[in-house]
Image (cartoon, grey):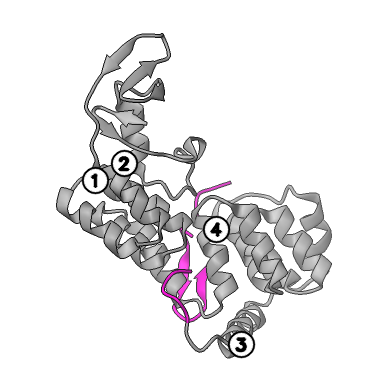
């Protein structure tokens, strides 16, 4: 995509505007304001949707950056970004390194364009002791919620899959998993209760109404069970060496257990 004489390659344009997308907000804003926002074809010129042709100059740096990423030379990819000092180039590297699960490069790139929330999210991912859980969080960062859950369930990390859905306010799915695996039903009900109390809402999900009267919400027990789950993760066997590369915004964090849900003003 050519944006006011800058070449921006966005491999999945439909995700640029999503909250969970790895694409920095600067890319979305730039696409929206660009005079070439409707461009549909690029060679050495721009073919606009109305049919007119506009000649323009393209930068060589995006092609250089893409070649580095394609060959997994992320340390080399950082150098042209630092040399050019272009936020758009940093944004492209941030998105590509996030998809490639290179945490160090993604962290540096997001920091360069002041995406503080994504930087903190990546720092939190690095604290997670289980590789599959890290991969799930990276999938979440890249906007693949279903992939994130599938990774966790395949690895036997049912608790994290439940917490993932709580974090994303997928209340039906969270309770479905808890009931199916016969674990942490009270945890799901407890977080749901907190959510409703915080926003002065009444329960309107029939399945929650069925379970809330028969299960006691004891937060001391719930916190104890949560800590036990994270302790089990810390004690899991891990490879002798873990690569630096391994996908939530809006969550509070346990430094030893990764992201934990926090109720916010979402429905």
Could you tell me which residue is drawn at 47 percent across and 85 percent down? 241
On the image, the x and y values in percent for residue 226 come to 62, 79
Q: Earlier in the sequence, mark 4 or mark 1?
A: 1
| Cα distance between the residues tagged 3 and 1 | 40 Å
For the point 58% across and 55% down, the residue is 168
Q: Main secondary structure of the magenta part?
A: loop
Q: Is residue 265 magenta?
A: yes
In the image, taking residue 68 as reference, residue 261 lies left or right, namely: right
Identify residue for label 3: 236
Is the C-beta separation of discs 1 and 2 under 8 Å? yes
Do the numbered discs 4 and 2 sit on residues whose CB atoms are within 8 Å? Answer: no
Where residue 266 appears, as percent x and y from the top left, is: 54, 48
Tag 4 residue: 139
Q: CA distance from mark 4 to mark 3?
A: 22 Å
Estimate the x, y position of residue 45 in percent, counting from the top left.
31, 21
Query: As rendered, which of 125 and 71 lies closer to the eye?
Result: 71
């Amino acid at each position: 995509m050519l944006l006011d004489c800058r070449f921006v390659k966005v491999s999945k344009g439909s995700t640029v505007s999503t909250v969970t997308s790895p694409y920095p907000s600067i890319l979305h804003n730039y696409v929206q304001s660009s005079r070439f926002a409707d461009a549909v074809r690029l060679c050495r010129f721009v073919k606009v949707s109305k049919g007119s042709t506009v000649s323009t100059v393209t930068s060589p740096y995006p092609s250089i950056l893409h070649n580095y990423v394609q060959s997994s030379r992320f340390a080399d990819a950082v150098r042209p970004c630092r040399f050019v000092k272009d936020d758009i180039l940093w944004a492209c590297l941030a998105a590509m390194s996030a998809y490639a699960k290179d945490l160090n490069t993604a962290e540096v790139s997001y920091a360069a364009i002041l995406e503080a929330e994504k930087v903190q999210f990546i720092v939190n991912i690095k604290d997670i002791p289980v590789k599959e859980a890290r991969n799930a969080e990276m999938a979440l960062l890249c906007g693949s919620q279903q992939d994130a859950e599938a990774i966790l369930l395949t690895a036997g990390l049912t608790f994290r899959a439940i917490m993932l859905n709580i974090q994303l306010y997928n209340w039906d799915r969270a309770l479905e998993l808890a009931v199916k695996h016969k674990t942490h039903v009270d945890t799901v009900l407890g977080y749901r209760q907190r959510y409703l109390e915080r926003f002065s809402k009444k329960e309107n999900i029939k399945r929650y109404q069925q379970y809330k009267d028969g299960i006691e919400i004891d937060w001391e027990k719930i916190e104890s069970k949560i800590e036990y789950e994270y302790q089990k993760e810390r004690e899991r066997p891990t490879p002798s060496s873990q690569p630096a590369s391994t996908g939530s915004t809006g969550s509070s964090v346990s430094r030893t257990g990764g992201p934990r849900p926090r109720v916010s003003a979402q429905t």
